[in-house]
Amino acid sequence: MSQATGVAETASRGDGRIIALVSAAHFVSHYYILLLAPLFAFVRAEYNVSYTELGLALVAFNVVAGTLQTPAGFLVDRLGARILLVAGLLLGAIAFTIVGLVNSFWVLVAMFALAGMGNAVYHPADYALLSQHVSNERMGQAYSVHTFAGLLGGAAAPASLLVMANLWGWRGSFIGAGVLGFAVAAILALHRDGEAHASVKPRASDASGEPAGWRLLMTGPILRNLVFFILLALISGGLQNYSVVALIASYGTPVATANLALTGYLTLSALGVLAGGLVVARTSRHSLVAALGLTVTTALAVLVGLVDLGSLLLVIIMSAGGFFTGVILPSRDMIVRAITPPGSFGKVFGFVTTGFNIGGIVSPLIFGAVMDHGDPRTVFILVAVFCLLSIFTVVQKTPQAAQH
C-alpha cells in the first residue's frame, strides 16, 4: 500500500514539474506576442515610421509563425519536443535582445520574423510534452494550467514592459524580455527527469492501418478541429479587439464602461480556463462540455448585440461570456488529443493551432469591414454565428485514435 502511494506521489511530482515547465514556456510565448503593442509609440517615434510600416514587424511575425507551425510539429515528432521548445525560446530571446541592441528599423522587422520562427514551435512542442509525459487523470488540469499561463503572460506584458521602459528605455524592455526567454530556456534545458525523447516514435501507416504524415492531417476529424480553432480565433478576435468600439458606437456606452466590460471578459475567461480543467477531470464528454459552453456564449453575444443592457448588466453579461469561453478551452484540447495517434501530437496540434493564425488574419478584415459600414451591433451577432458554427465542429462523433 505504502509503495503504491509512493509511486503515485512520485508521478504527481513529475506531472507537476512538466506542467510548470511547459506552462512557463507558454507564458513567454504570449508575453512575446504582446511585446510590441505597449511600446508601439516609443518605437515609432524612435524610427520615425508610420503605424503601417511598424505593423510590418507584426505581419512578419505572424506570417512566419503561421507558415512554419505545422512543419515545426513534424520536427517535434521526429526530434523530440523539449529540444525544439528550448530552440524556440532561444530564437525569440536572441531576436528581441538584438532588437534592443541594434539601432535599425529593418533589423527590428527581421528579428520579429525570427521570433515568429521561434513562436511556431510553442504549440506543437507544448502539447506534445504534456500529452506524452502527464498522466491521463491529470491531463485536463495540465491543459487548463497551460492555457491559463499563456493568458497570464499576455496580461503581464503591458505593465511590466512599461515599467522596464521607464527604467531603461524601450530598448531595455526588449532586452529584459530576451532575458526572460533565456532564463526559461535554461531551466527547460537542464530538466531531464529521465526523459529520453518528448515523443514516442510515430506509428507507420502501413503497420497500423492508420494514415500518417500529411494524410493524417487531411482526415475529416483533424480538419474539423482546424476549423474549430479558426472559429475560436474569430470569436476571440471579434470580442477582444472590437467589442469596445462596437459598444460605444451601438449604445453610446462610456469608454470606461466598455473597457471594464472587456476587462471582465478577459479576467473571467482566464478563471473559466481553470474551471474547465476541473470539469474535464470529471467527465469524458468533452464535446458536450464545449457545445454547452458555446451555446451559452451564443445567447450572451446575441443579447449584447440586440439589447442596450446598461452599465452593470453589460459588465456582468460580458464577464459571463468570458467565463464560458474559457471553460471550453481545456475540452477543446482534450478533443484534439482524443483523435491524435501516439507519436503525432506535434504535427496534429501544430496543424490545428494554425487556425489561430488564420483566424487572426481574417478577423480584422471581417470585423473591420462591419465597423466601417456603420453596423457595430453586427460584431456581436457575427460572434454568435461563429459560436454556432463551432458547435457543429465539435458535436460530430469522431473516432478515437488511440487510448493514451
Image (tube, rainbow, N blue to C red):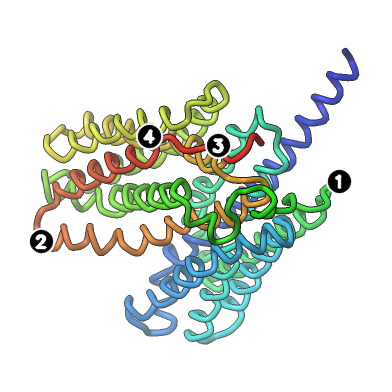
The answer to whether 358 appears left or right of 27 in the picture is left
Amino acid type assigned to the residue bearing label 1 in the image? Gly
State if disc 1 and disc 3 touch (CB < 8 Å): no
Q: Nearer the viewer, mark 1 or mark 4?
A: 4
- What residue is disc 2 on? 373
Q: Nearer the viewer, residue 29 or 213?
A: 213
Q: Secondary structure at mark 3?
A: loop
Amino acid type assigned to the residue bearing label 3 in the image? Gln
Residue occupying the point 44% across, 81% down: 46
Above or below, 148 against 82 in this view is above
State if disc 2 and disc 4 touch (CB < 8 Å): no
Q: Earlier in the sequence, mark 4 or mark 2?
A: 2
* Gap in angstroms between the C-alphas marked 1 and 4: 39 Å
The answer to whether 28 appears left or right of 384 in the picture is right
Q: Earlier in the sequence, mark 1 or mark 2?
A: 1
Visible in this render: residue 318? yes
Amino acid type assigned to the residue bearing label 2 in the image? His
Q: Earlier in the sequence, mark 4 or mark 3?
A: 4
Residue occupying the point 49% across, 35% down: 331
Q: Nearer the viewer, mark 3 or mark 1?
A: 3
Label 2 crowding class (10 Å Cα cut-off): few <14, some 14-19, many 20+? few
Which quarter shows the C terminus?
top right
**x, y percent for residue 202:** 69, 53
- What residue is disc 4 on? 395
Residue occupying the point 85% across, 19% down: 4
The disc placed on residue 194 is 1
The answer to whether 89 appears left or right of 3 in the picture is left
Q: Earlier in the sequence, mark 2 or mark 3?
A: 2
- What residue is disc 3 on? 400
Q: Nearer the viewer, mark 4 or mark 2?
A: 4
Which quarter shows the N terminus?
top right
